[in-house]
């Protein structure tokens, strides 16, 4: 193999330092148009809501749209990815709201029940004689 068949300068061969074949340094600017931030896919939030198993499988719906948003983002379709991202976000908001609302309502109802049973006016003897005091002793340990 001689260098002439590859049309290298006589003092330059591949993998060597060749000063005559170097081009002058400069900068190249390529305008790619407006580059926008890719939409968030909310995948971790959707996984948390899915694993919590909430009302009407809202977390699972959020997970589906999160995966679709990630797929569309990978394909380069940012408009479709943004639509799926918005749907995933709202399903996650609904699922998280429901996940917080149900335990909060259960605590409020339990407190109201205990307050009602603790009052002697208009109350019936639900726990039996001195039953409320023995019931409250369970929680005072």
Image: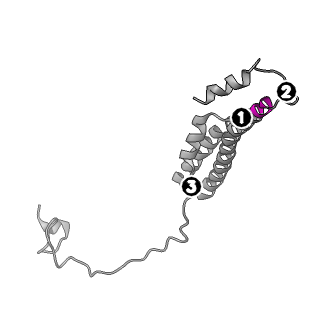
Q: Image height check: is 60 above or below 28?
A: above
Vertical side of 110 occupied by 9: above or below: below
Q: Which mark is residue 106?
A: 1
> Which label lies toward us, 3 or 1?
1
- Front of the two marks 3 and 2: 2
Camera-side residue of 96 and 58: 96
- Dot 3 falls on a residue whose secondary structure is loop
The quadrant of the rendering that contains the N terminus is bottom left
Q: Is residue 116 magenta?
A: yes
Neighbourhood count class around disc 2 (C-alpha, 10 Å): few under 14, some 14–19, many 20 upward: few
In-front residue for pair 94/35: 94
View extreme (right): residue? 122
Percent of width and height locating residue 73: 54, 53
Task: Tell me which label, 3 or 2, sits earlier in the chain.
Answer: 3
Q: Name the image quarter holding the C terminus.
A: top right
Q: Residues within 10 Å of mark 1 (few under 14, many from 20)?
A: few
Residue 126 percent location from the top left of the image = 79, 21
Q: Which residues fall within the magenta stretch?
A: 113-118
Write down the residue under mark 2: 123
Residue ID for mark 3: 40
Q: Nearer the viewer, mark 2 or mark 1?
A: 2
Tell me where residue 10 sits by quadrant.
bottom left
The stretch drawn in magenta includes residue 39: no
Structure colour scheme: one colour
Q: CA distance from mark 3 to mark 1?
A: 34 Å
- Looking at the rendered structure, which numbered label has been put on residue 130? none
Residue displayed at 63% across by 40% down: 59
Q: What SS does tag 1 mark?
A: helix
């Amino acid at each position: 193999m001689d260098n002439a068949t590859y049309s290298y300068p006589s003092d330059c061969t591949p993998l060597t330092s060749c000063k005559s074949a170097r081009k002058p340094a400069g900068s190249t600017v390529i305008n790619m148009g407006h580059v926008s931030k890719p939409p968030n896919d909310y995948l971790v939030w959707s996984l948390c809501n899915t694993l919590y198993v909430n009302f009407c499988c809202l977390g699972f719906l959020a997970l589906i749209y999160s995966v679709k948003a990630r797929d569309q983002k990978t394909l380069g379709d940012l408009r479709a990815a943004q639509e799926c991202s918005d749907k995933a976000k709202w399903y996650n908001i609904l699922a998280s709201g429901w996940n917080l609302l149900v335990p909060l309502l259960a605590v409020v109802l339990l407190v109201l029940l205990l307050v009602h049973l603790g009052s002697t006016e208009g109350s019936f003897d639900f726990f039996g004689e001195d039953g409320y005091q023995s019931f409250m002793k369970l929680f005072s340990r």
